[in-house]
Image (tube, rainbow, N blue to C red):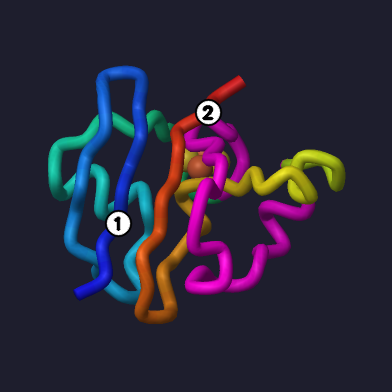
Amino acid sequence: MSQLTLITRAGTHELPVELNETVVAMAKKHKVTWGHACQRGVCAQCRTLVVEGASFLNEITSEEKLRLRKAERAEGFRLGCQIRIVGQGDVKLAHRPY
Ligand code: FES
């Protein structure tokens, strides 16, 4: 079974993967603190570094293209409210707000 690992300042959390659910929604459901205010790709409080498993995630959304610099996206940064897991495989994400 695929696993989602969320790394926050408070520690590392292992969650079961829920396909097509946003990372912010999964974190909330499992009471993992993952900053978010808008859930629309505007505030960037949910800024996330994809550590592992980028190929199992949805394509970068237009909101992420607007909010994150190209260089950040190239380094693997995304927005937790926009990321959805769409494929079977392990994914590791770190919360990295500005
Ligand atoms: S919650 Fe605001 S950009 Fe993700």
Q: Which of marks 1 and 2 is in front?
A: 1
Q: Nearer the viewer, residue 11 or 63?
A: 11
Examine the rendered structure and indicate whether residue 45 appears above or below residue 26.
above
Whichever of labels 1 and 2 marks the residue nearer the N terminus, that label is 1
Q: Is residue 88 above or below residue 46?
A: below
Give amino acid for label 1: Leu
List x then y, in percent, for residue 96.
53, 28
Residue occupied by mark 1? 4
Whether residue 90 is visible, yes or no, is yes
Question: Which residue corresponds to the image point at 44% horizontal and 45% vertical from the top-left?
Answer: 93
Is 2 contained in the magenta span? Answer: no
Q: Mark 2 points at which residue?
A: 96
Looking at the rendering, in which quadrant would you find the C terminus?
A: top right
- Report whether 37 appears left or right of 70: left
Q: Let me know if residue 38 appears in the view.
A: no
Label 2: few (<14), some (14–19) or many (≥20) C-alpha neighbours in 10 Å: many
Q: Where is residue 43 in the image (x, y as percent from the top left)?
A: 58, 33
Query: What amino acid is labelled 2 in the image?
Result: Arg
Spot occupied by residue 47 in the image (x, y as percentages of width and height): 55, 36
Q: What element carries label 2?
A: loop
SS class, disc 1: strand
- For the point 20% across and 47% down, the residue is 14
Report the span colored magenta. 41-67
Residue at x 26% of width, y 19% of height: 10
Q: In which quarter of the image is residue 91?
A: bottom left
How far across and how far down the image is residue 97, in percent?
54, 25
* Quadrant into which the N terminus falls: bottom left
Q: In this view, does 75 lie to the left or right of 5?
A: right
